[in-house]
Amino acid sequence: MKNILSPLKLTLISVSLLCSAFTSTAQADLLDDIKVKGEIIIATEARFAPFEMLEGGKIVGYSKDIIDEILKDLPNVKLTQLDLPFQGILAGLSAERYDFVATTLTITKERSEKYAFTYPISSAAIAILKRKGDDRIMKPEDMEGMVIGTQAGSAHNVVIDNFEKETLLATGSGYKSIKKFTDYNEAYAALASRRVDLVPQALPNLAPIIKERPDMFEVVEPAFGPETYYSWVGRKDKNSATLVQFFSDGIEKLQKSYRKAAS
């Protein structure tokens, strides 16, 4: 895994105005409890490169790099990081099975009503992954009549559905069908085997796919849908507020450091 400085310069974004909108200023107990206990339990879905993935049975990626840097401010706290299915990860947070979720989540209004988001870690602008040389798909509007592959439970599905309703159906017909998979790796495999025609996904996630399989895949731009962002979440209660603020402050601190280094 490369040093955190290189990838984070590309993925961390300047969204200072959003910070106050997605974090709480209330005083809380969970962070103090973690310090006393000497352990923090964080849930992750390690199937979302380049942010979270598995190498040699260990969770690695940009998000892990960020976590490790931030937790240097809790030197006596052990990190226990769980690799869990995406579809149940927020429900587990609500049920207090772990302290925090550091998996790459799109900030949405619906989620922000239930969970406390940290300072965003990256843009989540959505583009199209297609098979290399497939000239049928040259722009987002060419998704009309195509079989779409995506991940079940992903917030990207709202963008995909809205694009069909507001753009495609307004002038013609919609998608042929949408196939939803357990994770995006399955969707990429379906694209390679021609079971789907394309996979809409956030641009930061598509970069490593193209790097690994330049002979198989290519990206169609521009991005489509509204500008969106990736973030992490904690519970939206008084006990969790200072923990969410701790991670928000850590992300913002890293961002300022890398912007200064890049200037």
Image: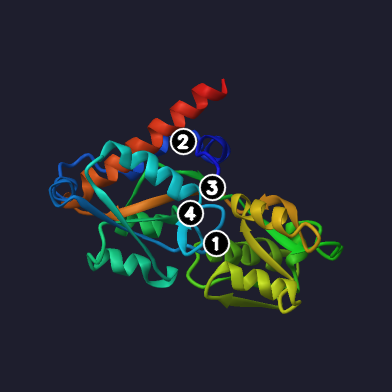
State the separation of the CA atoms marked 2 and 4: 25 Å
The residue wearing badge 2 is: 15
Residue at 44% x, 68% y: name it: 86
Which is more toward the observer, 208 or 241? 208
| Residue at (31% x, 69% y) in the render | 91
Secondary structure beneath disc 1? helix
Mark 2 surroundings within 10 Å by alpha-carbon count, few (fewer than 14), some (14 through 19), many (20 or more): some
Q: Amino acid at mark 3?
A: Met
Q: Is residue 171 above or below residue 16?
A: below
Disc number placed over residue 60 in the picture, else none = 4
Q: Is residue 263 above or below residue 22?
A: above
Q: How dense is the environment of label 1, judged by Cα within 10 Å: few (below 14), some, or many (20 and up)? A: many
Return the x and y of residue 182 as percentages of the image width and height. Answer: 52, 75
Q: Do the CB atoms of the residues marked 2 and 4 lie less than 8 Å apart?
A: no
State whether residue 33 is above or below residue 95. Answer: above
**Type of amino acid under label 2:** Val
The kind of residue tagged 4 is Val
- Look at mark 3 in the image and give the residue it sits on: 1
Callout 4 secondary element: strand
Rendering coords of residue 64 (x, y %): 43, 50
* Label 2 element class: loop
Q: Position of residue 122 (x, y in %)?
A: 51, 44
Measure the C-alpha gap from mark 3 to mark 1: 27 Å
**Going from the N terminus, do you reach mark 1 or mark 2 first?**
2
